[in-house]
Amino acid sequence: MKKTINVLLASVSMISVLITGGCSKKHDALPAINGFNTSNDVAADNLLAHWSFEGSNNEVISSTAPTTAAGNSFATGVKGQALVLAAGHLVYPTIAKLSGANAFPSVTVSLWVKISNNNTLQSNLFGITQPLATQSDWNTGPLNVYVETGNHQVGSDTLQLHSDFATYINSVRYNGDNVNNYGGTAGTDYQYVIQGGKWFHYVMVYDASGSNIDLYANGVVVSDGIFRHRTYTPTGGTETGLGPIVNSPGATQVVIGAWPTATAGFTNSPDQGWQGLTTGSIDEIRVYNKALTTLEIGSLYQLELANR
C-alpha cells in the first residue's frame, strides 16, 4: 500500500509540473522604436517640462501647479487622460527650467491636440510668455504654438497650424514664425493638415544652428519651406540668421489655451479681436531645449500613440 501511495503522489507531482509548465507564459519585452522603449526616453536629457494631464494640471518635472485654471476638465486622451478646455485656459507661475535668458536657445514643443474650426477666433494651445506684469503684446515672446481655427469654415476638416517665437538681439526684439497654409503651393511648399476634430501630434521645432523653424503633424513636416529660415538685417549690416533664442526678461510664465493677453491676466497686453480661448483637448505637452530630429519626432509620435 505504501509503495502504491508513493507512486500515486509521484504521478500527481508530475501532472502538477506539467500543468504548471503548460500554463506559464513568458511575455517578451515590447520592441524598441528607433532605440526608444517609451516616450520618456526620447531626448530625456533635454526635456525641460512635461504636462501629462493624468488627472492633474501640474507640470510633471517641477510639480508646478497653475495659478489660474478656468473651463478645464479631464477625459480620455491619446496616452491616459487629457486636458479638456471649454473656452478655458491655464496660467502657470515661473518654472525654473523654462526661465533665464538662454533657457532654450533651440527648442521643441510637442503636444497632442483635438480641435475643430470655429470660423472666428484663433486658438493658442501653448505659450511661454513674459511675466504677467511685463508682457506688453501677445507676440513679444518667446513662444506661441497655435491653430488658426478661424481660417476655415466651421467644422471643416482642414486645420492651419501656426507657431512663432521672439528673440532679443542687442535688446532689440525680432520675430520668426512658420505656417502650413500660406504663401506657397500646397503639396510642394507646405502640406495640408486634414485633422479637424481628430487627435493629431503637433510639433514645433526651432533649430538655432540654422535659424530654421519647422512644424510637424503626425511625424511629417507640414510647414512652408519658404518661411523656415528666419533672418534679420542689423543696421548697416547684411542679412543673417536669428540664431539662438534669447529671452528678455529672463523670467517666463506658461499659458495653455489662451493668448498672453488681458483675458488671461496679462494686463498690459490688450486682447485683439481674432484671439480666443481654446475649446478642444490637449495631451502630453513636452518642451525640450534642443531641436529634435525627424527620427526623434517620429519615435515620439509612434510611442505616445501606442500609449508608451
Image: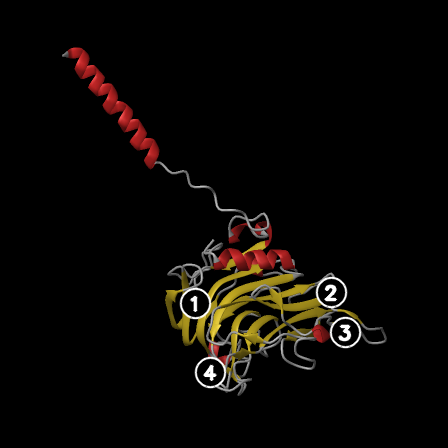
Between the residue at mark 2 and the residue at mark 4, the CA separation in whole angstroms equals: 38 Å
Residue 307 horizontal/vertical position (percent): 45, 56
Three-letter amino acid code of the residue under disc 3: Tyr
Determine which residue is flagged by label 1: 67
Label 1 secondary element: loop
- Contact between marks 2 and 4 (CB within 8 A): the answer is no
Earlier in the chain: of badge 2 and badge 1, it is 1
Three-letter amino acid code of the residue under disc 1: Thr
Residue 127 horizontal/vertical position (percent): 55, 70
Between the residue at mark 1 and the residue at mark 4, the CA separation in whole angstroms equals: 32 Å
Q: Is residue 272 above or below residue 281?
A: below
Instruction: Looking at this view, name the residue that lies furthest to the left.
Output: 1
Q: Residues within 10 Å of mark 4 (few under 14, many from 20)?
A: some
Between the residue at mark 3 and the residue at mark 2, the CA separation in whole angstroms equals: 10 Å
Determine which residue is flagged by label 2: 243
Three-letter amino acid code of the residue under disc 4: Gly
Q: Residues within 10 Å of mark 1 (few under 14, many from 20)?
A: few
- Contact between marks 3 and 1 (CB within 8 A): the answer is no
Three-letter amino acid code of the residue under disc 2: Gly
Earlier in the chain: of badge 4 and badge 3, it is 4
Q: Nearer the viewer, residue 215 or 237?
A: 215
Earlier in the chain: of badge 2 and badge 4, it is 4
Determine which residue is flagged by label 3: 232
